[in-house]
Amino acid sequence: MISFADEIKQGIPSELPALKAWDPSINHAPKRKEILSPAEKKLAIANALRYFPKEQHAVLAAEFAKELHTYGRIYMYRFMPEHPIFARAITEYPGKSEQAKAIMLMIQNNLDHRVAQHPHELITYGGNGAVFQNWIQYRLVMQYLSEMTDEQTLVMYSGHPMGLFPSHPNAPRVVVTNGMMIPNYSKPDDWEKFNALGVTQYGQMTAGSYMYIGPQGIVHGTTITVLNAVRRLAKTRDDIKGKLFLTAGLGGMSGAQPKAGNIAGVISVTAEVNPKAAHTRHEQGWVDEIISDLDELVTRVKKAQASKEVVSIAYLGNVVDVWEKFDQTGVHVDLGSDQTSLHNPWAGGYYPAGLSFDEANDMMANEPEKFKTYVQESLRRHAAAVNKHTARGTYFFDYGNAFLLESSRAGGEVMAENHIDFKYPSYIQDILGPMCFDFGFGPFRWVCASGKPEDLEKTDAIACKVLETMMAKSPAEIQQQMADNIQWIKGAQENKLVVGSQARILYADAEGRMRIAAAFNEAIANGEIGPVILGRDHHDVSGTDSPYRETSNIYDGSRFTADMAIQNVIGDSFRGATWVSIHNGGGVGWGEVINGGFGMLLDGSEQAQRNLTSMLHWDVNNGIARRNWARNENAIFAIKRAMEAEPLLKVTLPHLVEDQLLDGLFD
Ligand SMILES: NC(=O)c1ccc[n+]([C@@H]2O[C@H](COP(=O)([O-])OP(=O)(O)OC[C@H]3O[C@@H](n4cnc5c(N)ncnc54)[C@H](O)[C@@H]3O)[C@@H](O)[C@H]2O)c1
């Protein structure tokens, strides 16, 4: 059998590999709807055949046509590699550039069977968050990375490697764009069509940018969100006990909810229609119990409420049924949300009530228009049931999955009286925006490239020490955030959060990120740990413009602009990022958001020290500056503090207007 390194270096094999058997044990992507005309189908096949020499075309044309017909996409399953895909130690990757090897490690982590949602379809999370469109792109990219030097940059167009271009050692090794469209061609069906043609892909956030670290990436943010949502209802830890959190989704990101519920100390019920997803989370220990009978669920929840247990329960079925059942049986829900993939409502992101999981999969592929009406009807029921609970005191928030947006579009009763805003806040408006993003706190993360658990343990200790030192001098405004983050990093080992690479997430502000990264770089230089790859979720202070999510707490009208995300990726790319990415779509849907991210290899060098200082400072303060200009009070505070610390930073500050001056001007 060909060795791992040789298969990577081989790229596209000259001989056709044997056909692969369909593996039913894998969680496969749903069949995508048929959208191409016969002429467009021919174009899709011709596009796919561009990767292959003529003599292979006849065999592959028929095979790809069959894939297109059966799955709605051409994945080129035959070309799945022989080697198992997972993040190896950086030393195991062939190549001439350490930075390129770090990127290979991260790509493999995104496609690891334990990490990815639909690994055979190259989907990491969110139902359609793709790393590549097909297996040939994977092979070609790995080959390019294994042969490139630090004088070149690999250019990625939505999964397709356009090639290696001459650059310089401190340029990004890879520049990724995913799903960038001419704005008028950015409707959901445009994704279906142009993705089926093989010319674009939905990169989600960290899927197409090789920065996904499994559900841990989201547990921290979810814990912060659930904890602070509960704090709105209960002032002390004792008051929190016995509170019930009802939500849906045990998929890629949503799977973090029960774990976060346990850490926050509540009872959680998470509905999930897909048995494979529910059992995976149960086996991983992310959810304590699975119940598939509604009456049994009610009994179990009432018992947990009476005895104030901390427990996470998965309900195997539709979340709409749970909301309605709890209403009928008088189960009081304290906290409610939803993390079905409503950014992708018509193609498997949301399973409508009244259909079994299999019936829904069948209908969405074969009768897409009928399926759409089922989804809309279910959303109206869903919203109505939530409304009944909130009328009795449930605190409901939108979890950035476009639940309120899609419910309103379906005619659900979720609009506020002014018919402009929603009745319920997004988690960013009430919690993460004012408490975290405006101060610069966001989902900083790192991966120990040695693959050694002891390196991760050492980095945890280093980060904790940095935060404790900082907290001693932190202003009152950010003491709670610092305390939560220190508590998180102290409990991180015990909570066994690693799935895949040796990775850690830690919310930190600009100063925290720079100081932690500098301490890592020093430990690498001293030989205490191996190289470290830095990154972050795109769901952050500066990286994402998304009017119903990351930037939903921007109230000056600019939340429908995307200058911040574009400025961010450009700024990161010339301040030393190892790779950068910019995406259309991600989280809330195609056409609804522009988001970007970076990766940076720390190798202990002085250049790495210069890069981390320059880039991390910009990567956070860009967003704080913008939030400050939008008149967000906490951001004005944070940017003034940043200017005191760094004399070269000079940001335009807003003058605030007295409301009464405006009153009556246009009445
Ligand atoms: N966790 C976070 O911090 C966070 C932040 C912002 C947005 N989101 C959003 O949350 C959504 C979920 O993300 P994900 O990665 O978990 O997606 P996913 O597709 O992996 O998981 C969603 C799960 O919901 C299940 N589901 C769909 N309809 C259902 C229904 N009616 N009842 C019960 N279960 C149902 C699906 O089977 C699936 O397993 C996305 O839209 C994402 O953008 C999450």
Image: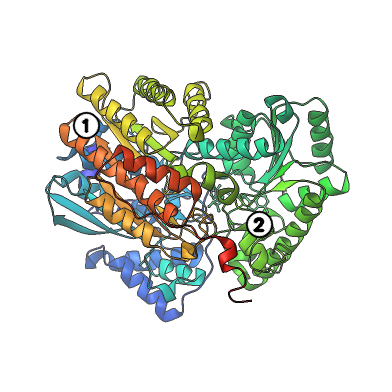
Q: Which residue is denoted by mark 2 in the rendering? A: 351
In whole angstroms, how far apart are the C-alphas of marks 2 and 1? 46 Å
Q: Which residue is mark 1?
A: 603
525 or 99: nearer the eye? 525
> What residue appears at the point 56 percent right and 37 percent down from the top-left corner?
224
- Label 2 CB sits under 8 Å from any ligand 1 atom: yes
427 horizontally vs 446: left or right: right
In the figure, residue 366 lies in which quadrant?
Answer: bottom right
Task: Tell me, yes or no, if residue 133 can be seen here.
Answer: no
Residue located at (68% from left, 26% from top): 237
Q: What's under tag 2, amino acid-wise?
A: Tyr
Left-right relation of 576 to 35: left
Kindly state the secondary structure of the residue where label 1 is placed. loop
Question: In x, y percent, where is residue 597?
Answer: 36, 49
Q: Which amino acid does the dot numbered 1 rest on? A: Asp
The total of numbered circles placed on residues is: 2
457 sits to left or right of 546: left
Q: Secondary structure at mark 2?
A: loop
Residue 496, horizontal then vertical, whole percent = 50, 25
Q: Residue furthest right?
A: 329
Give percent across and percent down for residue 96.
Answer: 14, 40
Q: Nearer the viewer, residue 125 or 229?
A: 229
Q: Quadrant of the C terminus?
A: bottom right
